[in-house]
Image (cartoon, rainbow, N blue to C red):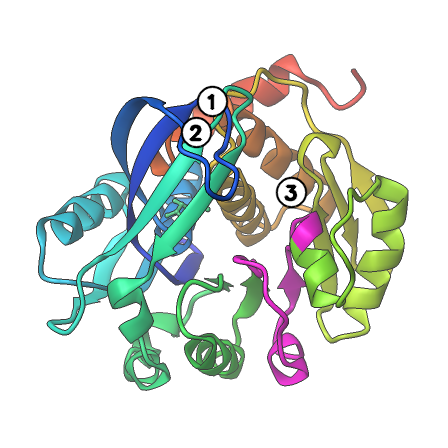
Amino acid sequence: MKPAIVVVGSLNMDFVVGVEHLPAPGETVLGRNFQMFPGGKGANQAVAAAKLGGNSVAVRMIGRVGYDVFADHLKASLSAAGVDVGAVHATKSQATGVALIWVDRGGQNSIVVASGANGELAAADVEAMRPVFRGARLALFQLETPLSTVAGALALARQEGLETMLDPAPAQPLPAELLAKVDILTPNESEALRLLGRPAARVSPSAAIEMAEALRWLGPKAVIIKLGDEGCLAHDGVAPRHVPAFPVEVKDTTAAGDTFNAALAVALAEGAPLEHALRFANAAAAISVTRLGAQASAPARREVDAFLERHPASA
Ligand code: RIB
């Protein structure tokens, strides 16, 4: 039987506008084009994991949508990638989540999420879906559902013997009890600084070593800090490892972190060593930033394998 990955998280319809530069407070900017894409950090990770691990890994999603046309689109996108959506339920009290996204010419973005139904996913709902976790290998979490739900689901995943991976996005401080239930923590640099209560700054790979150590003291067994065009810094208590990014032409960084997490989870679920899993994740994220959209930008497995063949480790 294939190892399974369970994703607990958000589903959003993304409304994306290309802009010359991101608007400053009080500024109106004229956008170029408008497009809608299936998104949401949870659904993005589920779709990317299914695209990357289609033949080797099964993916199950737990989430909440409303009774509307966006819900149908989002569930269809998950199903088309091969994700089991049996635990994505609809609520009458809220509309499906949406995200308003501006993407500038350099591919950087600003995102505002209206959580809607994602905010209705309660810890008790996840508890009722305990069978979804049974026999699975890894559970993936982010922070676009209520914190009490994430905490309860992390505990449940641990009880069922799954390894837990938390993407602490959007950035926010987290209680020690929650971090203690995380096996692999994957912040980007600003999320890592926020978790440590430090001011915003650009983080070099060498500075990230100390931050990863400090984050490991909070409970996670392994910390992987995503450093954008600097790659990633991993610390699992054995030795810190910096894995450089692949140079690519950036079009849109939306969901690059989601694709990274999904690829990491797939490689680990397949039993790959951490070093290999990190290169695989960097490659998947590199391909994703060359394309527009969230789930639309996640590569297929054959694309990542071909990319890695063109970029051998020694090159
Ligand atoms: O990580 C990218 C995602 O953040 C977008 O798809 C948007 O929906 C927000 O959740």
Mark yes or no: residue 109 visible: yes
Look at the image and tell me in which quarter the C terminus lies. top right
Residue linked to disc 3? 277
Q: Tell me where residue 229 sits by quadrant.
A: top right
Residue linked to disc 1? 303
Q: Nearer the viewer, residue 124 or 84?
A: 124
Instruction: Give the mark nearest the N terminus, 3 or 2.
Output: 3
Q: At label 2, which amino acid type do we have?
A: Pro
Residue 202 location (% of width, % of height): 78, 42
Look at the image and tell me in which quarter the N terminus lies. bottom left
Residue linked to disc 2? 299
Q: At label 3, which amino acid type do we have?
A: Ala
Q: Which residue is drawn at 60% across and 29% down?
A: 283
Report if the CB atoms under discs 1 and 3 are less than 8 Å apart.
no
Q: At label 1, which amino acid type do we have?
A: Glu
Magenta-span inclusion, residue 89: no
Which span is picked out in magenta?
167-190
Q: In this view, does 117 lie above or below 78?
A: below
Mark yes or no: residue 298 visible: no
Report if the CB atoms under discs 2 and 1 are less than 8 Å apart.
yes
User: Quick check: 90 left or right of 25?
Assistant: left
Residue 256 location (% of width, % of height): 52, 37
Magenta-span inclusion, residue 178: yes
Residue 233 location (% of width, % of height): 77, 45
Q: In this view, does 82 lie above or below 114?
A: above
Considering the numbered disc 2 on the image, is that residue within a helix, a strand or a loop?
A: loop
